[in-house]
Amino acid sequence: MSIAAVNARNQFRGRIREIVEGPVISEVDVQTDGGVVTATITTRSIKHLGLAVGSEVLALIKSSDVLIAKLRAPDAGTTP
């Protein structure tokens, strides 16, 4: 697989596991060595790129925000 230079440092190689296609927006699940990465992209882009289940792809993650949530120990007798 060949790709032009990209400045996104978080890159995960994988294969498309599932595509949930909508009329405008679709979800693409990519199975990587680290787990499943889900991308939300336009349905038009899926068709333009020729994406299909089993296609080898590169999931590129570029984000300006990272959120952190502190986990707390579950209390006895309470439900989450």
Image (tube, rainbow, N blue to C red):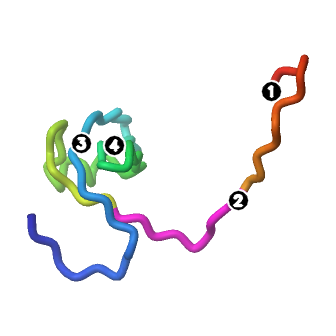
Q: Is residue 80 left or right of residue 53?
A: right
Q: Between disc 1 and disc 2, whose residue precedes?
A: 2
Q: Residue at x 37, y 35 (%)?
A: 22
Residue 49 circle label: none
**Around disc 2, counting alpha carbons within 10 Å, would you say few (fewer than 14), some (14 to 19), or many (20 or more)?**
few
Indicate the amino acid at tag 4: Val
The reply to whether the C-beta atoms of the residues labelled 3 and 4 are less than 8 Å apart is yes
The residue indicated by pointer 1 is 80
> Residue at 70% across / 59% down in the picture?
68
Q: Give neighbour class at mark 3: few <14, some 14-19, many 20+ (Cα, 10 Å).
A: many
Labels 3 and 4: the sequence-earlier one: 3
Question: Which residue position holds label 4?
Answer: 28
Instruction: Tell whether label 1 touches label 3 (CB within 8 Å).
Output: no
Report if the CB atoms under discs 4 and 2 are less than 8 Å apart: no
Which element carries disc 4, helix, strand or loop?
strand
Q: Which mark is residue 16?
A: 3
Tell me if mark 4 has few (under 14), some (14-19) or many (20+) residues whose alpha carbon lies within 10 angstroms of its own: many
Q: Amino acid at mark 3?
A: Ile
What amino acid is found at the position of numbered circle 1 in the picture?
Answer: Pro
